[in-house]
Amino acid sequence: MYRTSKGVETKKPTDDVLKAHLLKYQEQAQSQEQKCRSLTDDLGYSIRKRRFKPAEEVVKQAIITEVEGDLSRRNGPDYIQDNLRHKYNLHVGRDEQSYSSVYFPEDFVKRFPGRRLIRQNRTQLQSIGPYRWNGHEKLTALAVKMGELGISIYGYKDRWSDNLLYLVCVPESRSAAAGGHIFLDFVTEVGCIPIQLTTDKGPEIGFQHAFMAALREAYAPDLDATVYPPHVILKSTNDTPIEGIWRRFSQKVGANLKEIILRGKVEYIFDSTRHEHILLFYWIFIPLVQDELVNFQRWWNNHRVRTQENKMMPSGHIPSFALEYPSILNGVDCRIEVPKEAIARLREFLEEETNKSREEFFRWYPDDFAKAASSTWEAIGKPVIRLETAWDVFSQMMPLIS
């Protein structure tokens, strides 16, 4: 038994339970005071914490490896420290700045806010135009210009807590059916819907609008749709809470991903006229891209957002902490739970309506190609596939598949 500070005896949690809670608090970057309060609230238990500094050589090598993996060199010390803490449970503190200033001094100059940008030399237009296309480029075919190759990325974000709830990459498909499946995947993942869903205009929102309205009417019938409409459509320029996150995504992950992908074109490894090149690219790169999305989502949800004095909603907080403990920040949990059976019925309706399954919408390559690629990868010794080695593995596999 364990006696709390209030003199109440309670059973001490097992090491596994305590470890799981402490890791969760670490992911949320809770302060020492918040950790103690969370332990008391969750387990009725409090502990003291002592942290030992890791070996100098381990810290140095981890920092160098992390920085060298960022080809665009846009990530500063705070982001690198957070990544090392989340990936390896390695707390490097101010050592990151010290080693980066010695081994990568030019990175600080590149990120300096007042640096002068090198402007592109522009000449007179020689074609009718200009034409403008509106949308978030990311890694689409229009952005990378590698033939039909393209990746679409979609995300859902909670406005109050600033939590990035869902982030996924899918084949390029600006259709209502694809958007409907993405929405159902999202609701399946989080197990609930909000009082109101806000999106921009586009062909992907048709089924999302219908499903959101149907689910809210079924599981929150007391809400007046005229006062709290289930779905609001805005112009992209006005939907700033979700649009603003893409700039940070590009800074932290997107620019580096794009640079690595474009290496295949710049170094003449990838031939956009050969369909098997596109299929092998998807087989190798899609798991890597999705992993980067998961890492960015985790970082975003556990970083501290900037403080805004006049903001009525939370600021200067950790998004994941705000989502899990809204009452501490004077919030109310208004999420509407949705049973899995309801999602299954909507999925069945969507597949019957479109005569196409979810797997067909989100299939990157045929099953027979997946088997051939797996066999080829095994034949060359199952090399480790990372972003840094992806094109090398591509070059080894392509001749055997062709």
Image: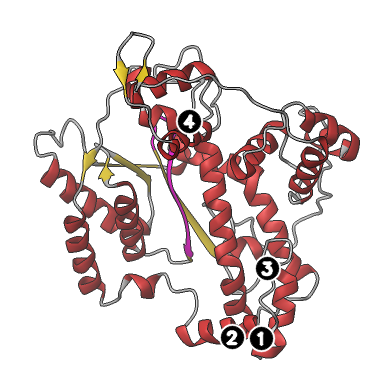
Q: Residue at x 61, y 78 (%)?
A: 280
Is 56 positioned to the left or the right of 127 in the image? Answer: right
Q: Residue at x 81, y 54 (%)?
A: 123
Residue 286 placement (x, y as % from top left): 56, 66
Look at mark 1 in the image and give the residue it sits on. Answer: 379
Q: Residue at x 53, y 20 (%)?
A: 31
The region drawn magenta spans 158-170
The answer for how far apart the CA atoms under marks 3 and 1 are is 13 Å
Name of the residue lying farthest toward the left: 222
Q: Secondary structure at mark 4?
A: helix
Q: Is residue 101 above or below residue 121?
A: above
Look at mark 4 in the image and give the residue it sits on. Answer: 25
Question: Disc 1 residue type?
Answer: Ala
Upstream in sequence: badge 4 or badge 1 = 4
Q: Residue at x 52, y 20 (%)?
A: 316
The answer for how far apart the CA atoms under marks 3 and 2 are is 15 Å
Look at mark 2 in the image and give the residue it sits on. Answer: 375
Residue 268 part of the magenta-drawn span? no
Look at mark 3 in the image and give the residue it sits on. Answer: 384
Q: Is residue 398 above or below residue 247?
A: below
